[in-house]
Image (cartoon, helix red, strand yellow):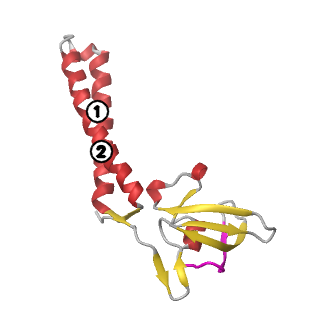
């Protein structure tokens, strides 16, 4: 199976490290629940035991997912500067203005860190991929998943 590299901001990497610590702590608590449930006797009709086993399976699956993310992550921490100035990259916060003068601000993050409500968009999304590599003053266009074409001018880029 090919390993896909995951792009993360330093903040995103730290959040996954903390999540792994929390999951490992929870794993110990689940083991205690299993021990307690076993004491109730017949495991074939023991709802507490079944619930603890299910929690254990979910916890182990998430631990494996988080470890995979941390092991394959490429942390993007530095500002990317090209010949024309600071370029949009993962970790950049970009302010855009459309033709009507409406402004919008996005932070470009890796796919596992996206949060549309917080305006954190993936570098692989239509908007994110259109922005990456551009500088202040560039005009970009992309098609939304709904099929609308959006056009913006980059007003500012910060880290």
In the rendered view, does 84 fall on the left or right side of 76?
right
Q: Quadrant of residue 6?
A: bottom left
Q: What x and y, as percent, mark residue 49?
A: 26, 20
Q: Secondary structure at mark 2?
A: helix
Q: Are marks 1 and 2 in contact (CB under 8 Å)?
A: no
Residue occupying image coordinates x 30% and y 66% = 2
Dot 1 corresponds to which residue? 26
- Residue 4 appears at what percent x and percent y? 35, 65
Residue 135 in magenta? yes
Q: Secondary structure at mark 1?
A: helix
Residue name at image x 55 percent, y 61 percent: 107
**Quarter-wise, where is residue 105 in the image?**
bottom right
Q: Is residue 103 magenta?
A: no
> Residue at 46% of width from left, 77% of height from top?
80
Tell me the number on the disc at residue 151: none
Q: Position of residue 154 (x, y in %)?
A: 65, 74
Q: Which residue is mark 2?
A: 20
Q: Quadrant of residue 94?
A: bottom right
Residue extending farthest bottom: 83
The CA span between labels 1 and 2 is 10 Å
């Amino acid at each position: 199976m090919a390993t896909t590299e995951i792009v993360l901001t330093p903040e995103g990497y730290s959040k996954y490290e903390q999540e792994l610590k929390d999951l490992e702590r929870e794993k110990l608590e689940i083991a205690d629940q299993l021990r307690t449930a076993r004491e109730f006797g017949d495991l074939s009709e023991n709802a507490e035991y079944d619930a603890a086993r299910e929690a254990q399976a979910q916890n182990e699956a998430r631990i494996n997912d988080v470890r995979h993310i941390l092991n394959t992550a490429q942390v993007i921490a530095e500002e990317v500067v090209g010949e024309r100035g600071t370029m949009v990259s993962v970790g950049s916060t970009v302010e855009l203005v459309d033709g009507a003068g409406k402004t919008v601000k996005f932070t470009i993050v890796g796919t596992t860190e996206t949060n549309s409500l917080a305006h954190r968009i993936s570098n692989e999304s239509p908007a994110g991929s259109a922005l990456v590599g551009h500088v202040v003053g560039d005009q970009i266009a992309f098609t939304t998943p709904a099929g609308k074409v959006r056009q913006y001018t980059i007003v500012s880029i910060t880290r």
